[in-house]
Amino acid sequence: MTQVTERGTSLPAAPRAGARRRSPAAAACVAGGAVAAGLGLGFLAVLVIVLWISSPYPDSGPGGALHLAAGLWLLAHGTELVRYETLSGVPAPVGLTPLLLVALPVLLMRRAARLGSAEEEDEEVLPAGAVFSAVLCGYLAVGALATVYAAGGPMPADPISAAWHVPLVALLAALGGVWGARGRPLGPLPSWLPGGVRRAVVRPRYALALRAGAGGALVLLGGGALLVGASLAWHGAEVQTSFLSLTGVWSGRFAVLLLALALLPNATVWGAAYALGPGFALGADATATPLGFAGQPGLPRFPLLAALPPEGPGTPLTWAVAAVPVVAGLAVGWFAVRRAREVSYGETALTAALGAVVCGLVMTGLAAASAGPLGSRRLSHFGPVWWATGAAACAWTLLLAVPVAVAVHAWRTRPARGLAALDALSALDVDEVVDDRWHDSGVREVRWAAMRRAAGTLIPEIGAEPVPPAVVAVAAAPVARAPRAVTVVSGRGLDLTPILIAAKPVPPAEALAPPLAPPLAPPVVGARVLARRKPPV
C-alpha cells in the first residue's frame, strides 16, 4: 500500500451502480442481423442490375433498378407493393408473393441467429432471448430503411403491410435459428398456463399428431407438384408459345424463367388445393375446381397460367385428382399409430383426429401465403381461399385417418399364433395334453441357444446327457499342498493342444466307481446363473 501511494499509482475506481456494461457479443448479434438483411438486398440488387444492363430498352436508370430491388426484397417478406402506372390510372396492388423468394430472407436470418448463438472459446455467451432480440433489432433497422428507400421507386411498398409482414418473417426465422443452435430443446411450457394444459401437452399423442399432420401435408404438396408437372407436360405447346411470345430478347426470357421458377411453390400449393376440391380463384369471377372451370378469367400471358385445365365442366380425368387427398388421409392414419400395446383404441383415434387438424392448419397457412392480388377489380384475388382449403384438408384426412389408424392399431396389437396355441392348451386338462413333441421338435435346443447367446460362456452347449465323473481310488499319500482348481476359458487365444504324458495304467472306472444315487431334485430348466462375488474384506 505504501509503494502504491509513493509512486502515485491510483487504484481503479469501482464501477458505478447505474452504469451499464456494453457487451461486444450483443453488438455482434445486432451487426449480424443487419448483415443478413443487407445480403438479401444485395443479392436482389445485383440480379436486377444485371437484368437492367442486359435489357435493350430499359425504362429507368440505375436508381429505378435499385428502388425496384428494395421493393422485391420487401415482397419476399409478404409485403404488398403498389403499382401506380396502370392503364386505368387506379393504383393496383401486387401482393402475390413468390414462395421461393421467401427462402432468401428466411435462410439468411436463420443463419445470423445461429451464428449469434454459437458457443466459442474465450467469448461471451449470451442467453437465447438476448441473441434473438439483438439479431431482430439489426434486421428490422435495415428493413425500415429499405421501406423508406423503396417509397421513391416505381413500385413502393404499402407501409402498413410492411409494418407487420417484415417483423413476422424475421421473428419466425430468428426463433428457428436460436432454437436450432441450442439443440432444439423442448423445455417445459410457461408457468402461467394452467397445470392441466401443461400436463396434457407433454403426452406422446401430440408429438405423433404433429408427425402425422406433417406427413399428410407433405403428401398433399407432393400430389400438387405431380399435378402441376403433368399439366405442364400435357399443355407443353401452349406453355412454349406463351413463353416465347412474351419477349423476344434473351434477357427478358431469362427474367420470365426466373419468375416462373420462383412461382413453382405457389403452383404446388394451388395444385394441392385443386385436388382437395375448393380449387383456386383466377380473379374475382373465375374459379378452377375438379368439378369444372367456371367464369371468364382475365388472365395475363404467362407460362404457368397456360397449363390451367380447360374451361367447362369437369371430366373423369379431373375427378381422378381426388386420389391425392385419399392418400394423404391414409398417411395421416398410418403415422398416428403408436407401437405400444397398452394404447387404447380411443387414444389412437384421438391422435389421428389431432393429426388431421394439424394437416388442415398447415394447408391453411400455405394457402394464405401462396395467394394474393395482382391488380384491382377482376385481378383482385389469385390463388386458393385459405379457409376453404384448410377445412377441406381437415375433412378429407379426418374422414380417412381415424378408421385407418384404428385398423392399423388392431393389426399391430393382434395376438401371436403361438400365444393363442399356448392359451388353448392351457385351457385343456393336463393329463390329456401330450407334450412329447415339445422335446422332439427342437424347441428346447432353440431356447437353450438363445439363453447361451444372452449369457455368453456361462451356459454350456446342449448335447448328450452328461456322464458322471469316474471316481478313482488312489492310495493315500502325503501331500504337502492341495492342488488348485484350474478353470480353462475358451476363446482367449490359448494353445489348448493336448500332449501325451506317460502315466501308469488305471483300472477301469466301472470296477471302482460306487453306484450312483438318484438325484435329490429334478433338473431345473431355464435357471439363472449368477456370477460369484468376492466376499468383502
Image: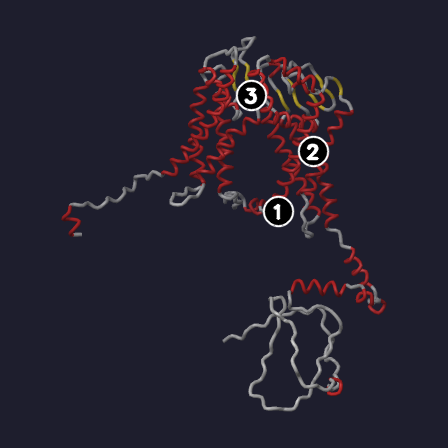
The foreground one among 523 and 139 is 523
Q: Identify the residue at the far top of this view.
A: 88
| Residue 305 image label | none
Q: Name the residue under label 3.
A: 95
Numbered disc 1: secondary structure: helix
Q: Where is residue 135 in the image (x, y as percent from the top left)?
A: 44, 34
Separation (CA) of disc 1 from disc 3: 40 Å
The foreground one among 124 and 22 is 124
Q: Is residue 412 above or below residue 33?
A: below
Q: Mark 2 points at which residue?
A: 395
Q: Mark 1 points at which residue?
A: 204
Residue at the (46%, 15%) spot, across then down:
64
Residue at the (61%, 19%) spot, across then down:
381
The foreground one among 450 and 20 is 450
Q: In this view, does 236 lie above or below 11?
A: above
Decide: marks 2, 3 in contact (CB < 8 A)? no
- Residue 459: quarter of image: bottom right
- The colour scheme used to paint the residues is secondary structure
